[in-house]
Image (cartoon, rainbow, N blue to C red):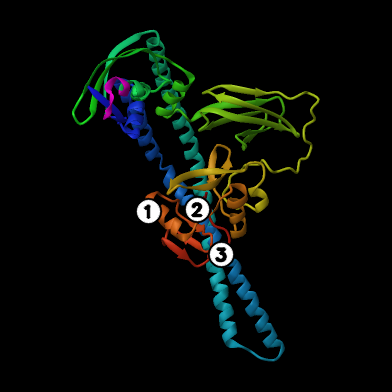
Amino acid sequence: MNVTCHALVLVLSLSSISQARAANLLNKEEQRILNDITENYDTSYAQLGIRNNQNEVDRLEAEKRYLEIKLQNERSKLKDESDKLEYSLLNGEYDEDRVDKLHSLSFEIASVNNKLTRAISSLKSEQISLEKLSSKLDELNHSRTSKLIKLYDEIKKRYSSASGIVYSKSYNGDLTCDLTESLTRCLAKNMGKIKETFYLVNGGREQINIEKFELSNATQELSGKVFYTVDVEYSKKLTSGLEYLIQKEIGLNQVSFTLQSNKVKTDFFIDGILVGSGKKVDVFGPYLGQHEIKAVNNKHVQSSIINLSQSENYYFPFKKNNPENKDSNDNRNKTGSLSETSLSVKDAFSGGLLKKGWSYKYNNTDFFAPVFLDRDRQRAIYLDYESAMSLCNVKFGGQLLSSLDYSNLESITKLESGEYWTNSGAIYSTYEHKNVAKTFLTNRVVCSK
């Protein structure tokens, strides 16, 4: 029978292949254990209430900034009215209306001052609570990571045990052929694609070695559709690529490790972002896989591409005659409590203090919020308009969002509550879901690229 290949029709879509690939990484028992770990973590995290606490801290910080600006404005009005009253009195005129206005302004200042005092007190209390909750969260993360490591070791052990076994199976599929070429030629031309599809639905080249792949049967319908059977012999393998996929699948991409040096004033950077300073820095974050580690001491630099692993120590020694930096006034790496994270342009472009926080891709555009790295935590930043524009343009090669961008983002993902700069210099409020009158000198930033 003469037929011709017209097009290869993959039985599985790319998404279903990807899902099958991920699902094949874990067996049912391993998936059950992973689900239990995830469920227990989510329950414990919700019970901590840290998200509500952080939202309250953000709200109080915003209220504090608002009251400080209002207090400054009211004092400026009071001074202006006082000067006018003094001028009137010096000219022998008594302005009772202005006196009443001064009394009113004085009462308003006292009221704002009291509100500001209460806001500062509440903020300090919430920050103390947040610090305590953060400590508990660290313990929760450590417990979860330990359980995931144990699960990962069991999965890795299973793959290692299975690596020497040769499996046999019959693989069935279909493709569509034309009617001008032979069935043999059609199948021969597409054998590479058939083999690649088998790889995909069985975990990919990272997971298996094909020992034998032979076509054993093929039938064709009058429509040109061909159904085939392939006899396959394959063995499973454990590679660094597969280990990475397993770690990523179970959520072990958050790794903890230690960076060390023989010098006290050593700055450690991961992919250009400052993660800590000192002779020893403990790091916890999404650093699974290969990353560039850079250690800097008094302008001396050591750099290496490292495949970062859980609970490892990485040591970067400097020569003993390398003098420490004696400048005690260098505060660029101090990372204290950021109750007020308002950065200048100079701060925003110095030493890797900033990095991309959350990100979202929509209509081929990447949206991301720069954050301030405070030890192992990320803090929202507040900038004036000019600094915000410069940050997006120069630091990240992007631009500020429009009001429409913010509105669209709110409809498809959750934005942190607050006020954000737009590219026109207006302020978009997530509370009002629209542009609002300028209230603060500094506001949050989201960039697009």
Three-letter amino acid code of the residue under disc 2: Ser
Q: Position of residue 176 (x, y in %)?
A: 27, 30
The answer to whether marks 3 and 2 mark residues whose Cβ atoms lie closer than 8 Å is: no
Residue at 50% over, 47% down: 368
Say what secondary structure mark 2 lies in: helix
Q: Residue furthest left?
A: 222
Depth check: give the residue in front, 63 or 261.
Answer: 261
The answer to whether marks 1 and 2 mark residues whose Cβ atoms lie closer than 8 Å is: no
Q: Which residue is mark 1?
A: 411
> Is 80 situated above or below 419?
below
Cα–Cα gap, marks 1 and 2: 32 Å
Say what secondary structure mark 1 lies in: helix
The residue carrying pointer 3 sits among few (fewer than 14), some (14 to 19) or many (20 or more) residues within 10 Å by Cα, namely some
The residue carrying pointer 2 sits among few (fewer than 14), some (14 to 19) or many (20 or more) residues within 10 Å by Cα, namely some
The answer to whether marks 3 and 1 mark residues whose Cβ atoms lie closer than 8 Å is: no
Three-letter amino acid code of the residue under disc 1: Ser
> Is 165 situated above or below 367?
above
Q: Is residue 154 visible?
A: yes
Q: Which residue is mark 3?
A: 113
Does residue 261 show up magenta in the picture? no
The residue carrying pointer 1 sits among few (fewer than 14), some (14 to 19) or many (20 or more) residues within 10 Å by Cα, namely few
Main secondary structure type of the part rendered in magenta: strand
Three-letter amino acid code of the residue under disc 3: Asn
The region drawn magenta spans: 177-186
Circle number at residue 122: 2
